[in-house]
Image (cartoon, rainbow, N blue to C red):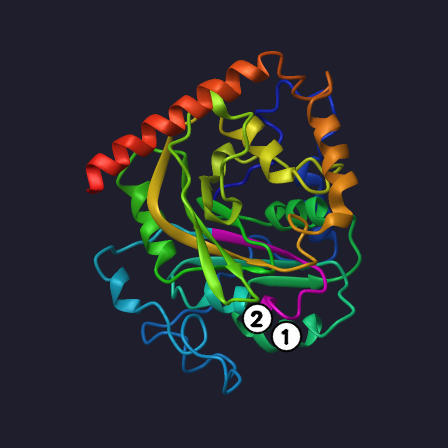
Amino acid sequence: MLVNSGTSKIKKMKSSLPDLSKYRSDFLNKGISYPLPTSVSSKQGLLKVLPKVKADQSGWPYTEETKPSIYDGQRIWPKITIVTPSYNQDKFIEETIRSVLLQNYPNLEYIIIDGGSTDSTLEILKKYSPWISYWQSEKDSGQGHAINLGFSLASGYYYAWINSDDYYLKSVFKTVVSTFLNSNTEFVYGFGGNMLNKSQRVEEFRVRRLFDYFLRIPSLFQPSCFWKADIHQPIWEELECSLDYELWLRMIKGKRKIRIKKLLSVANVHVNAKTYDPKMKSAWERDHHLICSVDAHGPVYNWDKLIFMNSLYLKITRIIEKVTFS
């Protein structure tokens, strides 16, 4: 079991970041046991025992599951902790939950922190509660706070969070954990997809190999990122939109990183998603000013040079890929 307060390696940030051990203490004072129980798994798989889905729902992760037998080659699989922050996403959260559980990973800790949803999210959480390590539905201070609450209870060796309108693809946990086990890496990332709900088409987002020099240019696909527990740091809760980007700036610089060149997750594109909601423009701008303030990461003085070098790097990468795969 790994216990990480999430504050041990924060050196540069002058802005306030929470101490996750204090959040954990609050949970313990409420009678929550730590570490949490792992999610229920079965060598026969969970597909037949999970709640039934609607007749028009088929394929992954509704009528298909990751074959449990893919884990037979390893005697002990390290615990992985997945956190899902949620608020009023009843159209998508069941898909999210099933995509986690139907990985059939044998050592899973799954935590859902819901901000007191007023739609039917609560009924869905209750329906899946026997297979979730811990969940709660009560008012919080936003997405960053919810993620921090979840990770304050985490005891896995590897971490990730997935929002309640995204989902993992089949066999992803096996692929990711095997990558960790077969390397000395601290951070694993891969390709992602955007589900265009109007056309029901997945648009692939191919993440390029990441270098620290280009970290200030957003390039990672958040739900396709996984990391070792011992490098974890808290989310900056003042941020509303760019919290993943800011976390990468702080957490993965100088760390060993490996890219998996395949789709790991899919994000649903819908009008209420922060990335696509025009009403969130001012929140994005506010986050930008906070991140670039002198109390945080500071301005990028060589932005034009950085953009030029990144453009050159992308062109060279495309040429190499074209030659390699032609």
Q: Distance between the residues labelled 1 and 2?
A: 7 Å
Secondary element at image label 2: helix
Which residue, given by chain and number where applicable, does mark 1 sit on?
Answer: 124
Q: Is any part of residue 212 visible from this angle?
A: no
Where are the magenta residues, as a range?
Answer: 81-93
Mark 2: amino acid: Glu
For residue 161, side relative to residue 46 (left or right): right
Q: Nearer the viewer, residue 281 or 255?
A: 281
Above or below, comparing residue 114 to residue 153 in the picture: below
* Residue highlighted by disc 2: 94
**Where does residue 103 sit, x and y in percent of width and height?**
40, 64
In the image shown, does 91 or 206 lie closer to the viewer? 206
Q: Is residue 12 left or right of residue 77?
A: right
Q: In the depicted view, which residue is nearer to us: 36 or 252?
A: 252
Other-residue count near label 1 (Cα within 10 Å), few / some / many at <14 / 14–19 / ≥20: some
Name the residue located 53 percent from the left edge and 68 percent from the top edge: 95
Please say whether residue 323 is visible from this viewpoint: yes
SS of the residue under disc 1 = helix
Kindly check if marks 1 and 2 are in contact, taking CB atoms under 8 A apart as contact.
Answer: yes
Residue 210 screen position, x and y as percent = 42, 30
Q: Pick the residue in front: 252 or 300.
A: 300
